[in-house]
Image (spheres, rainbow, N blue to C red):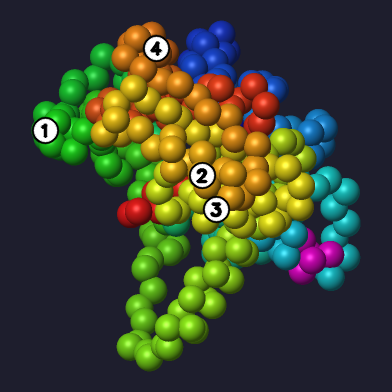
Amino acid sequence: MCGFLGEVAFGGERISHSRFEYLLSLSKSRGPNETRIEGLGNRALFGFNRLSVLDLTSNASQPMWSPSKRYLLMFNGEIYNHMEIRKYLSDKNTFISSSSDTVTLAHAIDEWGIKKTIEQLDGMFAIAIYDRSNKSVSLIRDFAGIKPLFYGLKKKHLVFSSKYNQLSKHPIFQSGMVDTAVLKLYLTQHFIPPPFGILENTFSLSPGEIINFDSNGDIKSHNYWTYPSYEESQFSQNEVIRDIEFSLQESVKSQMISDVPTGAFLSGGVDSPLICFNAKKTAGNQLNTYSLTVDSPTHDESFLSTQYANTLNVHNELIEMNTNNAIEILNPSISSIGEPFGDFSILPTWKICKVASADITVALSGDGGDE
């Protein structure tokens, strides 16, 4: 996952280094492999907790300067088409030794600038970029809003982070008032949608949005991606099936590029077995999958997930969840979120991730397929 924290003081001075370290540590669970902080005098601090997936060496450490040293960037996520982007850069006589998609991103921004680079990306990401030439900051979120990115701006002081509690515990915002309109929205939806934050002067980026803060902290925002419009077309049933199969296969294949062990979550539904089927084809060997069994006959899908696992010939670990151990994980699962969140599905999600993390670093999931 990775997690980052950044602070830029457009007026006045930033917080102390020790306080910044504490706030950065709140996202350590997102990036347990390496922690680094880069400072820009009294003006800015960038901090990163890394989960190593591509290029496990220090060549991919973040925060990362672009080759020209103009841009300092932090990137959480994965760029699925970064090798295609790299081929174009290589044609420009750009030699990139690291296999990291972050390195590809740094080279591309030097070559094309921020806006054009972001428009080329296929992936899930939250990105923060400091432009040293004009002392501006750009925040970018992927088109589907998969990766979180929060920010707060008050008294010419910008803070941005991967977890909301890194804002809510920051000295600038921790005494802020609860926005009652956002609280009402949370009580209705059980989560806080972008662009809102529960505290005044705090926000989150919308999917497909770029926000730029100039040297004075003034904001400009635009959407680099919107839903495309389609003309009505006629397709045969066979054409639809063929296109869906191809798209699903290519999507799963692109998300399995990794230098660390990869697995998948397997339920008794439709979406995750399809993903596991294509993941097994891509892996070409044994695929580790993980399923839940619960002590509720109404909600237990273990019978179907076990049948799927046997049919797919995957190694499936069945994880038991019951009333007692659900209570045990209530506090750690809620604490891991760092923001108001009322969806009880976080409990089984936290449980299966906790068990799977002993074997794998990256997990594919059908979560969201129904939507």
Task: Work out whether mark 2 precedes mark 1 in sequence or the reverse, and give the earlier one.
Answer: 1
Q: Residue 87 location in percent, x, y?
A: 79, 66
Q: Is residue 207 above or below residue 16?
A: below
Q: Is residue 166 above or below residue 120?
A: above
Mark 3 highlights which residue?
Answer: 275
Q: Amino acid at mark 2?
A: Gln
Query: Who's the residue at 59% across and 35% down the image?
Result: 316
Within 10 Å of the Cα at label 4, are there few (<14), some (14-19), or many (20+) other Cα atoms?
few
Residue 137 at least partly seen: no
Q: Splitting the image into 4 quarters, where does residue 188 fall?
A: top left
State the CA–CA distance, disc 3 to disc 2.
15 Å
Q: Residue 50 location in percent, x, y?
A: 65, 29
Task: Work out whether mark 4 precedes mark 1 in sequence or the reverse, and give the earlier one.
Answer: 1
Within 10 Å of the Cα at label 2, are there few (<14), some (14-19), or many (20+) other Cα atoms?
few
Task: Work out whether mark 2 precedes mark 4 in sequence or the reverse, and give the earlier one.
Answer: 2
Question: Considering depth in this image, is 65 or 248 the residue closer to the camera?
Answer: 248
Label 3 vs label 2, nearer the camera: 2
State the CA–CA distance, disc 4 to disc 3.
28 Å
Q: Quadrant of the N terminus?
A: top right
Label 2 vs label 1, nearer the camera: 2
Q: What residue span does the magenta drawing correspond to?
A: 86-90
Task: Work out whether mark 3 precedes mark 1 in sequence or the reverse, and give the earlier one.
Answer: 1
The dot on residue 325 is 4
* Secondary structure type for disc 1: helix
Q: In screen coordinates, is 2 left or right of 339? A: right
Task: Work out whether mark 4 precedes mark 3 in sequence or the reverse, and give the earlier one.
Answer: 3
Task: Work out whether mark 3 precedes mark 2 in sequence or the reverse, and give the earlier one.
Answer: 3
State the CA–CA distance, disc 3 to disc 1.
37 Å
Q: Amino acid at mark 4?
A: Asn
Mark 1 highlights which residue?
Answer: 184
The rendered magenta stretch, by its main secondary structure, is classed as helix
